[in-house]
Amino acid sequence: MAGESGAQTISATVLVHEAWLRVSRDKEQRWESRRHFLGAAAQAMRCVLINRARDKKRLKRGGEDAERVDLDALGDAEAALAFDAPDEELLAVDEALDRLTAEDALAGEIVRLRYFAGLTWPEIAEVTGMSERDLNRQWAFARAWLRDAMEK
């Protein structure tokens, strides 16, 4: 998160806590592997971010004309989120990611782990059991596919 702007109003701590609340709801849940857990965590973080982006756009939440409050100025040193994308772009990525996942589940998983969970390439390689070289190929495919899908 270092070096990211304060455009978002959710801290990394809040994001992780909200994601944990989502994945830990089901007391019967048994994680098959680290990959299974991280995939669920990435999906939960995605849901939290998408819901917040949608909420910001709703009129009952102030709509497009809401005034942004800089939480850093209020003393919250972790106010910045790992994503510097505007809400509209985040929502477009979410919709395109659903279509990508339907076409190529592995590419969708890699995007969720990298973009929403913020895992590094070595971490994703460990979780998926793929080489970093193969991951980079999948990432290049996924980025091109998403860019194309978002332009349509």
Image (tube, rainbow, N blue to C red):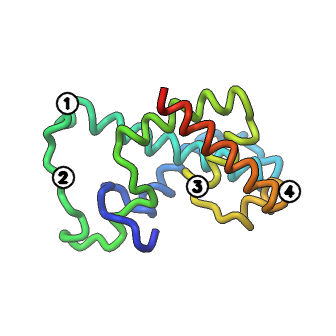
Disc 1 residue type (three-letter): Lys
Residue depicted at 46% across the width and 68% down the height: 1
Sort mark 4 into few (<14), some (14-19) or many (20+) by Cα contacts within 10 Å.
few
The CA distance from mark 4 to mark 1 is 45 Å
Sort mark 2 into few (<14), some (14-19) or many (20+) by Cα contacts within 10 Å.
few
User: Which residue matches tag 4?
Assistant: 129
Residue depicted at 74% across the width and 33% down the height: 104
User: Which residue matches tag 1?
Assistant: 60
The CA distance from mark 2 to mark 3 is 25 Å
Q: Earlier in the sequence, mark 1 or mark 2?
A: 1
Q: In this view, does 137 lie to the left or right of 69?
A: right
Give the quarter of the image for residue 52: top left
User: Which residue matches tag 2?
Assistant: 68
The CA distance from mark 3 to mark 1 is 29 Å
The CA distance from mark 4 to mark 3 is 17 Å
User: Which residue matches tag 3?
Assistant: 117
Evaluate if marks 2 and 3 touch, with contact meaning CB atoms under 8 Å apart. Answer: no
Q: Which of marks 2 and 3 is nearer the N terminus?
A: 2
Q: Which of marks 4 and 2 is nearer the N terminus?
A: 2
Which mark is in front, 4 or 1? 4
Sort mark 3 into few (<14), some (14-19) or many (20+) by Cα contacts within 10 Å.
many
Disc 4 residue type (three-letter): Gly
Give the quarter of the image for residue 89: top left
Residue 106 location (% of width, % of height): 76, 41
Residue 28 location (% of width, % of height): 72, 40
Q: In this view, does 108 lie to the left or right of 147?
A: right
Residue depicted at 56% across the width and 44% down the height: 44
Q: Nearer the viewer, residue 80 or 147?
A: 147
Instruction: Describe the element under mark 4 as helix, strand or loop.
Output: loop
Residue depicted at 76% across the width and 55% down the height: 135
